[in-house]
Image: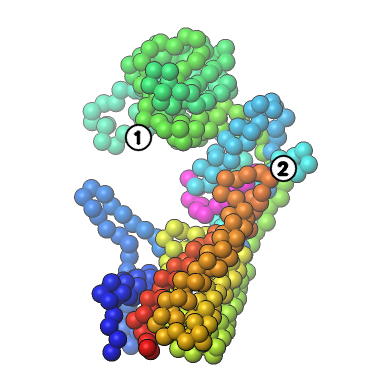
Amino acid sequence: MAFIPKQTKNLFFTIIGLAIVCLAINLPPSFTLFGKTFYRPEFNFNLGGLSFKKNIDLKYGLDLAGGGSLVFEIDTSKTTSDNQASALESLKSNIERRVNLFGISETNVQISKINNTHRLTVELPGISNLDEAIALIGQTAQLSFRGETPIPPEATPSATFNDLFAKDTGINGSHLVKAQVEMNPNTSEPEVGLEFNAEGTKLFEAATKEFLNKRIAIFLDEIPITYPTVQSVISEGKAVINGSFDTKSAKSMAAQLNAGALPLPIKLISQTTIGATLGKDSIDKGIFAGLVGLGLVSLFMIGNYGFLGFISVISLFIYGLITLTLYRLIPVTLTFPGIVGFILSVGMAVDSNILIFERMREEVRAGKPWNVAMELGFGRAWDSIKDANTCTIITGLILFNPFNWSFLNTSGMVRGFAVTLLLGIIISIFTGVVVTRNLLRVLAKKNN
């Protein structure tokens, strides 16, 4: 019996353990086996004062889960060219926040431009009350400033933010000219600068006098977004909010404030409802196509490469488990194009194995021992595997458009295809080069 190094054995058992964990994650929530009901493990645990709960159900997009798609026309006539980009970004972030508070997850909010008209597209998978969502999205952002109010001790345990900040200062979004990220000249740390119009300047001066050394909370759509302490009376109409900001959080705060300061009216121009039945039919067809593709690929590999092909099929099975596990844990929102990307990646997952096996055959024909031919096959096929997959990764990144560049694709459906394709490529490199190689070292017969 051939000697197997300890490191190879350890990696083999690690791969088997990873496959078992992934299999457990991808089990149905409950299933019956030999007359006994079993339940999928839950990702719930407590660590000190922290609790963690992870929903590992697969997330489906609009085309698979059903729901609604809303298209709004954006009125930008009241904004200047300098403010238009920030106003549109504020509108988008505000709509995303609203639909998330509404309890809708995995939404897709996009802004596009057709000729000279800006449009807002909101996709809401799984929603049952489309009219309520339309009413929620169509509201103009409401910004308000409220002062801290003393609360009787007996009322403190049940007090809410609305109780704590009950005094309306009269300042709203119409008084705020703009909010922007600034750098503190003394500390070089980011902060959020506020600029008020003439009426807002007077109201803000009165508010800072009244609530000196107290807090003023800023509410957006009745949700508190910050509650800084007033450190001095401010009469010039400009103020800063400082604290534990980094550049990203300061930009997010400014965008939220601008959502109330620069409201852009939107008008619904179309709505589409997709029934869950259509989505289920698409899922069933996608699963059937995936199983057929997996079966045909397995038959080809075993028929062409024998035991080597059987090892690659095991590796392909592990590839599928890891991929589906990441879909659940990230989570990835599956659309029908995303399922197509996964099916395409199934075929690509064995591509590296084919390159490796053909290189092994060449080495065996050249008179090399089997185990030497195997190691050389993996080593010499790596350059081809790397170059081919790098090109596909670049294409996938262009389709995914991670930086939201306007000159590239912004479609959620295409991005769904791109993300499953990218994950598939990365995982296929791991399973093709690491998993298959280790399985061959442990399971395949080595001839001298």
Give, as a three-letter code, the residue at label 1. Answer: Thr
**Residue with the mark numbered 2:** 113
Q: Residues within 10 Å of mark 1 (few under 14, many from 20)?
A: few
Q: In the rendered image, which quarter contains the N terminus?
A: bottom left
Q: Where does the magenta region start and end? A: 101-113
Q: Is residue 110 shown in magenta?
A: yes
Give, as a three-letter code, the residue at label 2. Answer: Lys
From this view, report whether residue 182 is shown above or below residue 417: above
Q: Nearer the viewer, residue 18 or 26?
A: 18
Residue drawn at (33%, 88%) of the image = 34
Q: Tell whether 424 sits left or right of 268.
A: left
Q: Nearer the viewer, residue 422 or 275?
A: 422
From this view, report whether residue 52 is shown above or below residue 222: below
Q: Position of residue 71 (x, y in %)?
A: 68, 48
Q: Position of residue 9 (x, y in %)?
A: 29, 76
Residue drawn at (28%, 52%) of the image = 51
Toward which corner of the image does residue 307 lie, by quadrant?
bottom left
